[in-house]
Image (cartoon, helix red, strand yellow):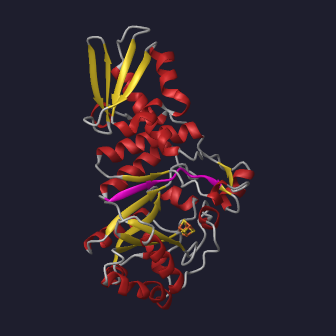
């Protein structure tokens, strides 16, 4: 069972500079101040009392945790130690930069109960990293992963396709290099133009063009498929639709959608639908069977997949039924004597030509 995450946002604290795309205050809200130990304990207790029985993981997001001065680290981590000893907090998760990790840092984190480190990687392309003002290299990412993994820490990698200088091919090359590091999970956030960032200035001057929503969905689809094929879970695609993020003027431009992941997964299912209905005669009514919780993804928002299937193949979806015997990646098409079953992972292939047509 997944742990219940109790998040604390320490926006921009510890960051050596501001990356061109980043405005954590707009993403997470608040002033980015450190929580006091009383505030942390109160929030943890409230979460534990919320009736959910998962184990608790305390998370520090939104800054560069491992460059914080030692007194600050101790102020944040020491109050959690009695809770860890009592089993009330199972583990701690922190996010940081790849160039802010070494063996000493990893040993310290481990000793304090940290079990997961999320690395803001964004890209493995040196040109993209430079244009995005990251201030680290792809080699720093590889080194950070190696060090953290050698201490037995779980590593998450965050990728951000669509940054300045990026192309779909570069995004996919970054994904491949990231997957080669065998991270425990990925997050994929297509780059957005947020107010108050250097990226917003570049965009206003006409020096930066974000991915369109359609481009980001198509690229996200191929990236998600690549991660699935490598058995690396993608725990989030697209920024969380917080009140702060969705407030007027926060997103200046870019491929934002509050249900971005559903759109991406809907594309994968649509590709599988096209494959499974190849050769089905026009106007044939078909019944689809899928894992019960996947019905809405397969139908698509406003029934877009059903309509597109009819427009492209002339095939009518007469019904769609949940079947718990199917896996979440499977889809079955039935009509009369026809019965075809497919799996997103094994039956779809995305060649480089597919992705070079993204833009
Ligand atoms: S992307 Fe990470 S390192 Fe860069 S400013 Fe934002 S929180 Fe700091």
Asked whether residue 300 appears in the rendered view, the answer is yes
Residue 184 lies in the magenta stretch: yes
Residue at (30% x, 37% y) in the render: 345
Location of ligand 1 given as a quarter of the image: bottom right
Is residue 206 rendered to the left or right of residue 322? right
Give the vertical position of 105 relative to 60 (above or below).
below
Of residues 99 and 35, the one drawn nearer to the viewer in this rendering: 35
**Quarter of the view holding residue 90:** bottom left
Q: Which residues are magenta?
A: 183-193
Give the vertical position of 111 relative to 152 (above or below).
below
Is residue 158 rendered to the left or right of residue 180? right
Question: How many tags in the picture?
Answer: 0
Give the vertical position of 340 relative to 82 (above or below).
above
Q: Quadrant of the N terminus?
A: bottom left
Is residue 207 rendered to the left or right of residue 102? right
Residue at (36% x, 24% y) in the render: 288
Residue 12 location (% of width, % of height): 58, 73
Asked whether residue 95 appears in the rendered view, the answer is no
Residue at (43% x, 14% y) in the render: 315
Residue 43 location (% of width, % of height): 50, 75
Residue 358 location (% of width, % of height): 51, 35
Of all residues, the one furthest to the bottom in this rendering is 71
Of residues 11 and 197, the one drawn nearer to the viewer in this rendering: 11
Residue 49 location (% of width, % of height): 44, 71
Residue 171 lies in the magenta stretch: no
Q: Quadrant of the C terminus?
A: top right
């Amino acid at each position: 069972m997944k742990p219940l995450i109790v998040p604390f946002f320490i926006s921009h604290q510890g960051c050596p500079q501001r990356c061109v795309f980043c405005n954590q205050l707009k993403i997470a809200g608040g002033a980015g101040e450190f929580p006091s130990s009383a505030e942390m304990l109160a929030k943890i207790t409230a979460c534990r009392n919320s009736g959910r029985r998962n184990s608790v993981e305390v998370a520090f997001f939104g800054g560069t945790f491992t460059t914080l001065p030692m007194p600050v680290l101790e102020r944040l981590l020491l109050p959690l130690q009695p809770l860890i000893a009592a089993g009330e907090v199972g583990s701690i998760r922190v996010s940081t930069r790849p160039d802010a990790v070494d063996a000493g840092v990893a040993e310290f984190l481990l000793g304090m109960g940290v079990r997961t480190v999320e690395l803001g990687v964004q890209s493995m392309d040196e040109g993209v990293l430079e244009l995005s003002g990251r201030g680290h290299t792809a080699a720093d990412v590889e080194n950070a992963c190696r060090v953290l993994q050698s201490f037995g820490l779980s590593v998450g990698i965050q990728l951000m396709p669509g940054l300045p200088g990026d192309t779909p091919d570069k995004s996919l090359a970054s994904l491949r290099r990231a997957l080669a590091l065998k991270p425990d999970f990925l997050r994929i956030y297509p780059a957005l133009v947020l107010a108050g960032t250097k990226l917003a200035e570049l965009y206003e001057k006409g020096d930066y063009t974000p991915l369109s929503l359609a481009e980001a969905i198509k690229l996200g689809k191929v990236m998600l498929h690549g991660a699935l094929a490598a058995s690396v879970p993608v725990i989030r695609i697209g920024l969380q639709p917080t009140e702060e993020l969705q407030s007027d003027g926060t997103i200046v431009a870019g491929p934002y959608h509050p249900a971005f992941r559903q759109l991406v997964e809907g594309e994968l299912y649509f590709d599988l639908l096209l494959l499974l209905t190849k050769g089905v005669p026009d106007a044939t009514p078909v019944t689809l069977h899928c894992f019960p919780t996947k019905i809405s993804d397969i139908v698509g928002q406003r029934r877009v997949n059903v309509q597109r299937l009819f427009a492209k193949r002339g095939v009518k979806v007469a019904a769609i039924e949940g079947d718990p015997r199917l896996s979440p990646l499977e889809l079955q098409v039935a009509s009369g004597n026809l019965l075809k079953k497919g799996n997103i992972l094994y039956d779809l292939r995305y060649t480089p030509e597919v992705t070079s047509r993204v833009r």
